[in-house]
């Protein structure tokens, strides 16, 4: 069963009626693809009720970013969610706030700002982005009061920021990170992929292929620093390509076993992110 709610009033009424049923939260900005649907499927497995939110959060877009043209495809999104609902006896609530004020009331004047890990990688290119993300995610945690919340590993740094927030503020919510879903050629699914031209779609494969090559090199104990330096110097479209400690996002030491390779690659029409987790033996 699927229910669509668009105001805070409606949502609160519904939420109060639920009692102690376990609730899973899947926060999204819409334009749903298989990556989002994998989060919803997992939530449906683990909870009685799943709340998927569709809200293009203005606070996480910089002044020259794509807030206005971000793909808004509500009808298609609802139809994809309905397909999942048909094959399940679990309840799905689609919360689509009808205005920004449903999430940030008129006198809302707070920011949740996580320090440290937000200053590197994406933080260097999108200065207030993570304040916008942590503020909206915190708001959704408060509104939905879920037991579990589901995020995609594709936005690795975002996951780390949210985990840090949950830990620092002692929020009573369990964070579940789901693996990256890729297309048949290896490109990580993202709503922004649709900005790409045909040629750019081909060039975009540089990102996952480089990360994969780097993973092999790490597993073979090769000199990956030289590979990274060479890649960055040969192609200025990389915003960054780094191998980090997957727990802290700091530089690894020789004993670090769990690494993450993170990359951001700039094309004319979109900026693409990808990552790979590597477990050294
Ligand atoms: O990953 C996203 O789509 C967004 O950053 C999120 C978590 C829904 C917050 O707006």
Image (spheres, grey):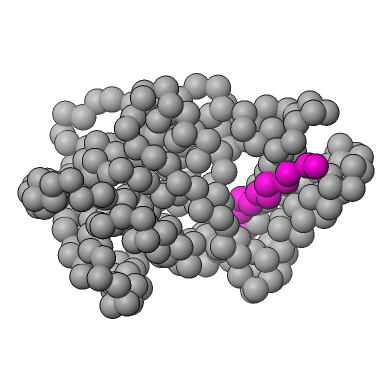
Q: Nearer the viewer, residue 3 or 75?
A: 3
- Give the side of residue 73 with respect to residue 198, left or right: left
Residue 269 is inside the magenta segment = yes
Q: Residue at x 39, y 40 (%)?
A: 174
Q: Residue at x 13, y 51 (%)?
A: 18
Res 279 quadrant in image: top right
Q: Nearer the viewer, residue 280 or 272?
A: 280
Q: Is residue 34 above or below residue 128?
A: below
Residue 165 is inside the magenta segment = no
Q: Is residue 281 above or below residue 249?
A: below
- Residue 81, image x, y percentages: 32, 69
- Give the side of residue 142 with respect to residue 225, left or right: left
Q: Residue at x 65, y 36 (%)?
A: 246
Res 189 quadrant in image: bottom right
Magenta stretch, overall SS: strand
- Give the side of residue 173 with respect to residue 13, left or right: right
- Residue 102, image x, y percentages: 18, 44
- Residue 99, image x, y percentages: 20, 50
Q: Quadrant of the N terminus?
A: bottom left
Q: Is residue 67 above or below residue 40?
A: above
Q: Nearer the viewer, residue 15 or 201?
A: 15
The part of the chain drawn in magenta is 268-281
Q: Residue at x 62, y 28 (%)?
A: 248
Q: Would you say residue 58 is visible in this rendering?
A: no
- Residue 73, image x, y percentages: 34, 67
Q: Is residue 182 above or below residue 245?
A: below
């Amino acid at each position: 069963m699927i229910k669509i709610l668009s105001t805070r009033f409606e949502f609160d009424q519904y939420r109060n009626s639920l009692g102690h049923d376990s609730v899973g939260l899947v926060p999204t900005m819409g334009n749903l693809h298989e990556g989002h649907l994998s989060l919803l499927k997992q939530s449906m497995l683990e909870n009685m009720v799943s709340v998927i939110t569709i809200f293009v959060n203005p606070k996480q877009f910089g002044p020259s970013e794509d807030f206005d043209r971000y793909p808004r495809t509500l009808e298609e999104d609802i139809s994809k969610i309905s397909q999942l609902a048909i094959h399940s006896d679990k309840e799905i609530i689609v919360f689509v706030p009808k205005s920004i004020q449903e999430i940030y009331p008129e006198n809302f004047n707070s920011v949740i700002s996580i320090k440290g890990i937000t200053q590197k990688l994406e933080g260097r290119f999108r200065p207030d982005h993570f304040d916008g993300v942590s503020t909206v995610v915190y708001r959704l945690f408060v509104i939905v009061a879920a037991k579990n919340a589901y995020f995609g590993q594709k936005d690795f740094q975002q996951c780390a920021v949210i985990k840090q927030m949950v830990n620092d503020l002692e929020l009573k919510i369990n964070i579940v990170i789901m693996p990256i879903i890729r297309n048949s050629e290896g490109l990580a699914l993202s709503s922004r992929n649709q900005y790409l031209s045909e040629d750019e779609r081909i060039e975009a494969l540089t990102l996952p292929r480089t990360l994969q090559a780097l993973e092999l090199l790490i597993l073979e104990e090769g000199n990956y620093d030289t590979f990274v330096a060479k890649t960055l110097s040969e192609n200025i479209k990389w915003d960054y390509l780094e191998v980090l400690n997957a727990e802290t996002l700091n530089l690894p030491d020789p004993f670090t076993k769990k690494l993450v390779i993170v990359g951001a690659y700039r094309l004319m029409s979109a900026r693409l992110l990808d990552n790979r987790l590597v477990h050294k033996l």
